[in-house]
Image (tube, rainbow, N blue to C red):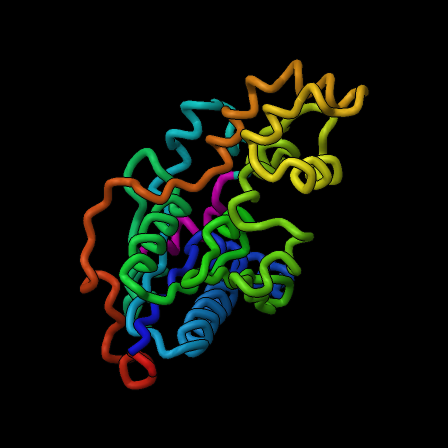
Amino acid sequence: MIKRVLLIDGSSLIYRCFHSISAKNADTSPERFKENFFSLFSFQVRKWLSLNRYGFGAVLFDIDRKSFRTEILSSYKQDRPPMPKELLDWFPEILSKAREIGINPIFAPKGYEADDLIGTISKQLAKADFRVDIVTSDRDLLQLVDYLISVIRIKSSFNLEINNHMNFSELNEGLLPFQIPLFKALSGDSSDNYSGIPSIGPKNAMKLIKDYPTKERLVSSLNQLQEGKIKKSLQENIKDLDKFLQLATIQTEIKFKYSLSDLALSSENNSRTGQSN
């Protein structure tokens, strides 16, 4: 019996719904705007729940933007705008709507992001032979992909791209899941507001990782690199690589108490979900 779990990145979900409705309903009334938002929210969650015969699931959220990462780098995510007032006002109803659909919202513990909770739950359940699907628009979560964990990325117009252990390298320019943090640490991440190693950028980061697949290989091979600005920048800034890796790496062993009953889908979904052969 295959036990299946669906973990939804709550922030990705509500922001995608909000901005999709905003683009299509610029001149609509506030009441109609809200109605359209919740209609899209419900439709997407139900659609994702129907992708497989899931017996368990959750929608995961951050408590706030402060985390151990902001302790490492105070400007981490600093440039992101605050949550739109409408979403703040609707948030209690968003949680209620998720429960009504039959999937529980769960919040990351203080000091961590929802990504870290998703990482922890997915890896724990995979060790217990659950198949885990993660729905998100965030590329960071790609690092969690393994034999039992797939990341389903929300693309434009809510199209979905399934990243699994079989197609990962093809979809991600030859990278493997464990190399995603190193790629981000080298090239930086403007959405998270850190620069990475100067003079590297995505193209050079990709080349370096193909030649030196791990941080340890790269660091031990610095003297072998061709002379130039890339070698010079790495030598001068290599101490920052660990800092950026800490920012980029999703935690998978945070302390968080939960039980399978917290993840059990309600009876509304049990008629069409559950365990499958």
The quadrant in which residue 250 appears is: top left
Look at the image and give the residue range highlighted in magenta: 82-92
On screen, residue 106 versus residue 258, left or right, reads right
Decide if residue 54 is in sight here. Answer: yes
The quadrant in which residue 46 appears is: bottom left
Q: Is residue 89 magenta?
A: yes
The N terminus appears in which quarter of the rendering?
bottom left
The quadrant in which residue 72 appears is: top left
Furthest-bottom residue in view? 271
Q: Nearer the viewer, residue 211 or 87?
A: 211
On screen, residue 131 versus residue 181, left or right, reads left
Q: Is residue 71 above or below residue 127?
A: above
Q: Is residue 48 above or below residue 215?
A: below
- Report the residue at 48% width, 44% height from top: 83
Q: Main secondary structure of the magenta part?
A: helix
Q: Is residue 167 above or below residue 214?
A: below
Horizontal and vertical percent position of residue 60: 36, 54
Horizontal and vertical percent position of residue 100: 29, 71
Decide if residue 14 is in sight here. Answer: no
- Report the residue at 75% width, 40% height from top: 203
- Report the residue at 57% width, 68% height from top: 160
- Report the residue at 69% width, 38% height from top: 211
On screen, residue 70 versus residue 265, left or right, reads right
